[in-house]
Image (cartoon, helix red, strand yellow):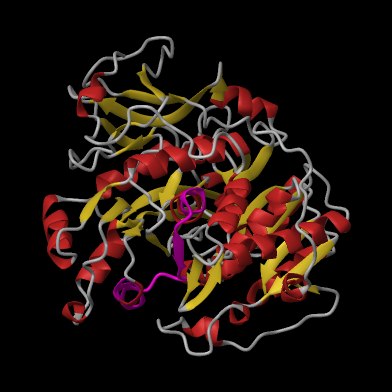
Amino acid sequence: MEKIWMKNWPAGISEKLVYQLGRKPIFKYLRYHARTQPQKAAINYYGAEISYSELDAFTDRLAAYLAKNNVQKGDRVALFMQNCPQYVISQIAAHKAGAIVVPCSPMFKAWELETGVNDTKAKVIICIDQVYPVVKEVRKKSSLEKVLVTSYADFLPPKPIIPIHESMQEPKRKFPDTVELMEILKTEGPPYKSPEISMEDVALLQFTGGTTGLPKGAMLTHGNQLFKSAANAQVYKYVPEDIMLTSMPIYHIAGMLWGMTSPLYVGCTMAILTRFDARATAMAISALKCTKMYSTVPMNMDILTLPDIGNYDLGSLGINPCTSFGVFLNEKLVEDWGKATRGGIIVEAAYGLSETHTCDTFSPLDKPRIGSVGIPIYETDLKIVDFDDPEKELGVGQVGEITVKSPAVFQGYWEKPAETKNALRDGRVYTGDMGKYDEDGYVYFLGRKKEMIKASGYNIAPEEVEGFLMRHPAVEQAACIPVADSKRGETVKAFVVLRPDFAGKITEEELIDWSKDKMAAYKYPRFIEFRKDLPKNTIGKLLRRVLREEEKEKG
């Protein structure tokens, strides 16, 4: 399609992407900032600051430790923690050592972590002490050689200026056969010299449900990460003076881009919150004078409905890209947010996916369009194609499959050539998502072609939840579908066929409670319905669409 969106390119923003220091890994941008603005705060953690020179030194020390302990270029290092300075330090250090980072959701239970660690053959895991019991359960059945443990208390100030979550108030814990991360970070040494690292080297194995199927590790390179960090920073006007409120999970690709790698690229400050809390967020903006924030619409609504919202000065917050989960950005919310922040701008952040390091579109700040995910970002060829004939590109207003080709497209799925071939053709990602262009070149995301469930921004493969459910001795068959959820967008409903000897001996509620204990919070089914059988076709393939249609008829 002709680039009709260029007529709506934002005023004052270059139409060409320019890298501030050239094409080099993000950790080299950190090194530059450490030399040119050494005392500048790279991180503010509830009032405690870590300067750029300190962050560079911490990452050097950890990189040197990894190199001395058999972590070679291309080896995998898993990270298993919520937002905290240690996450930033660990990711950058692993990249300095040439390792590939495997972000793991801190909500993972043992089965899920075991799958992630063993699929990637990770040598090292760096975790927060609160989740070590999960690591311990997995450790003997995994490829792990070293376990490094840290605590939120390690970097918290004695008197936090922003309220901390009760879970962060637990005393620091130590465990046998583990290494204390802080002991490594305190051990001074010379500047670390990285091995030769190419922009085509893989930096991340970002696990995703992908365009279809069970979770897979999307192989994202240093070049992918730099491109999206630079592009995002340029269109959303990141500057060194910014204070970016980082409360979205940085183990998730969107939170990582907005809240960590884009700030490191420009050399601004990350105000890190371990967990989102509406009052703590309002206090952080007010006390730290945060200028930018990436959020979801429900987060903004929670802040606006604080009974004492008037007690907080939110006027410093200039730009707030957000993602619509469950509740969509609308004109009233834009107006209310503008009033609360005295002119702050809130826009739909982007369309994107893990396979493209997210942010394939952006909303022009001077011409946002309600309901749209914006226009294609730099060097991005976003085509809408016919579902039945992918060679046929569709025109304005026609709904088809979103496909993406850009310098951020991943190398493929880790050790899954068949799945890679299905999703990635001639350098173009076939997303399985439905979308369209309007007459001005704005893109609209209209849902997923496939059966993926998306709850609170997380892609959930039905097959994965079904597999976990069938580990319960009472479950013979299971099928999962999405149902609408006003807060989370979608949530999981499971249809279960019990084994004959368990009929009448277990309730739906008991199985939900079991699931809650065995699966991540965003993943376990909130609803379970027992069935005598499940719909299947003549060759025995499960027909989830029949279940979705039945649910739709129920309203």
Q: Image quarter for residue 463?
A: top right
Where is residue 327 shown, x and y percent of the image? 25, 55
Of residues 87 and 60, which is closer to you in this image?
Answer: 60
Q: Is residue 296 magenta?
A: no
Q: Residue 1, relative to residue 305: is it above or below?
A: above
Residue that appears at 15% across and 64% down: 342
Where is residue 68 shown, x and y percent of the image? 87, 58
Q: Is residue 182 left or right of residue 51?
A: right
Residue that appears at 55% across and 20% down: 427
Q: Is residue 178 left or right of residue 527?
A: right
Count of numbered labels shown in the rendering: 0
Instruction: Tell me where the magenta segment starts and ends, as one range.
Output: 262-286
Of residues 188 and 1, which is closer to you in this image?
Answer: 188
**Quarter of the image that includes the N terminus:** top left
Of residues 496 and 418, which is closer to you in this image?
Answer: 418
Residue that appears at 71% across and 50% down: 96
Where is residue 460 shown, x and y percent of the image? 50, 49
Q: Is residue 236 left or right of residue 532?
A: left
Residue that appears at 29% across and 61% down: 298
Mark yes or no: residue 43 visible.
yes
Mark yes or no: residue 499 visible.
no
Q: Residue 342, relative to residue 531: is it above or below?
A: below
Where is residue 352 shown, x and y percent of the image? 42, 38
Q: Image quarter for residue 550?
A: top left
